[in-house]
Amino acid sequence: MESKINRITDILRRDDGISGAMHYTEQISWILFLKFLNDLEETKNEDAQLDGEVYNYILEEKYRWGIWAVPKKDGKIDLLNSKSGDDLLEFVNKELFPYLKSFKNITENPKSIKYKIGAIFEFLDNRIANGHTLREILDIIDDMDFHNQSDLFQLSLIYEKLLKDMGSDGGNSGEFYTPRPLIKVMVDVLDPEVGQTIYDPAVGSCGFLIEAYNHIRYVDIKENKQRDLSVEQLKFLNEDTFFGNEKTPLSYVMGVMNMILHGVESPNIAKTNTLTKDIRGLEEKDRYDCILANPPFGGKEKDQIQQNFPIKSNATELLFLQHMMNSLKLGGKCAVVIPEGVLFQTNNAFQSVKKDLLERFNVHTILSLPSGVFLPYSGVKTNVIFFDRVGSTSDIYYYEVNPPYKLTKNKPINYEHFKEFLQNWKTRELTENSWIVKKDEIKDFDISAKNPNKNEDIVHKSPIELVENIKDNNKEINDLMDEIEMILIGKDI
């Protein structure tokens, strides 16, 4: 399957309508999705027949894969009725896409897969400029089989790799991909269970929600070994567990598609800007058991957005942190990636938010991440804050992750780098990489991660020595300036 996807990406790179990893991932996505949908419908039809029932197809016959994409006759491709070239492009652009886009308008049930299809295609268009190229890709994907759990599992892995490659492409693609080892660590610490609600306010490609799903659904994901869950539990997992918001159209499309391709047919993902919601109106029933997020940071929000928050700030990261604090259920757990600045900045807004955080929540752990975790699209130093809504903070367990090499695009963070942290965070065992800070030791709500085990000896000089050093430095600078002046005068002569 992976070699077929690689062939398709090579083919797409030669198409005039495709430019870069973001485009070819987007185009492979919609074709893969329609093949997956076809195989899903065929499986449901077979199951219905076994039960003596009639299955109502989502797609009208004309728009089913086996009719327009790769029509068959006696089990072989019907070359006579297979569209190609301009005929194929005409059908896809002027009939298929308008039909799929219309789904969102003809059903009002946002949990239905029909609604999800409409939501996906609302923000998608076919970019493949050559109909013969599209024909070639359809034939390759038709050869893939998504009828059973093992095939679907392989598809989910392939899709994750596509998203990872798009993230590694840098630029704006970074919003699609948080390193999966980091996501897995955050999920492992929160340890979500079936029956709980899980939320990501900046969902991107749904990496956190999918890892949480895998954590709940699988005993051993490498062996594709699933937990035994009741019909009611599976229904709750599929329809009422996962929630998220995403404001960027393509991220939203990738996220919803990623959830469906991983087996969650009805994720509650909304295309909206989370920060436009006034958090002061939230009720307990609107809150979540687990919140996992790597929200955007470094942005500047307008006054209109800031009005939705008790503590106003133009810093995106500070507004998202307030949103998550207010969205957490009593007894709920949160893990969020934040830039280093949030921990050490002590201006009014930052102090106020951190005061609220420490007094109303139990900030039990701060994980200090090494520089380069989010390369190539961001070099900002970051941390993960873990907090629960179970009372106030008494002390914070810090852990500093120190990989044996400098992280780069080609040498990324690995799950293995968190091994000691995962072994020790619950028991709070102290090593050279960890320490505990009591709340009453925190000054001005500066909760930055300063490892006391790695302090270098600081030589303190007297004021007189400092003045003498400044004089010496100034003398050296004046001497250099005199030399430069003589050289320039010499040139003029």
Image (spheres, rainbow, N blue to C red):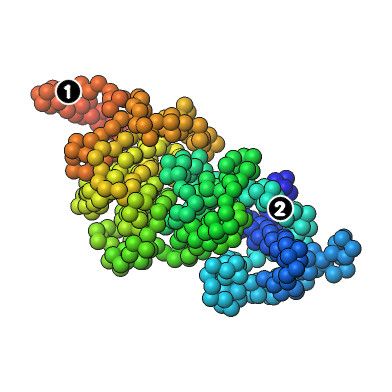
> What is the quadrant of residue 365 in the picture?
top left
Q: Is residue 197 above or below residue 282?
A: above
Disc 2 marks a residue whose amino acid type is: Asn
At x 64%, y 40%, the residue is 223
Q: Which mark is residue 148?
A: 2
Crowdedness near tag 2: few (<14), some (14–19) or many (≥20) residues, C-alpha within 10 Å: few
Disc 1 marks a residue whose amino acid type is: His
Question: Which element is circle 1 on?
Answer: loop
> What is the quadrant of residue 422 in the picture?
top left
Q: Which mark is residue 460?
A: 1
User: Is residue 5 or residue 180 the one in the foreground?
Assistant: 180
At x 31%, y 35%, the residue is 397
At x 34%, y 39%, the residue is 366
User: Is residue 129 or residue 430 the one in the foreground?
Assistant: 430
Instruction: Pick out the residue farthest to the right.
Output: 74
Question: Which element is circle 2 on?
Answer: loop
On the image, the x and y values in percent for residue 302 come to 31, 64
Instruction: Pick out the residue farthest to the bottom.
Output: 106
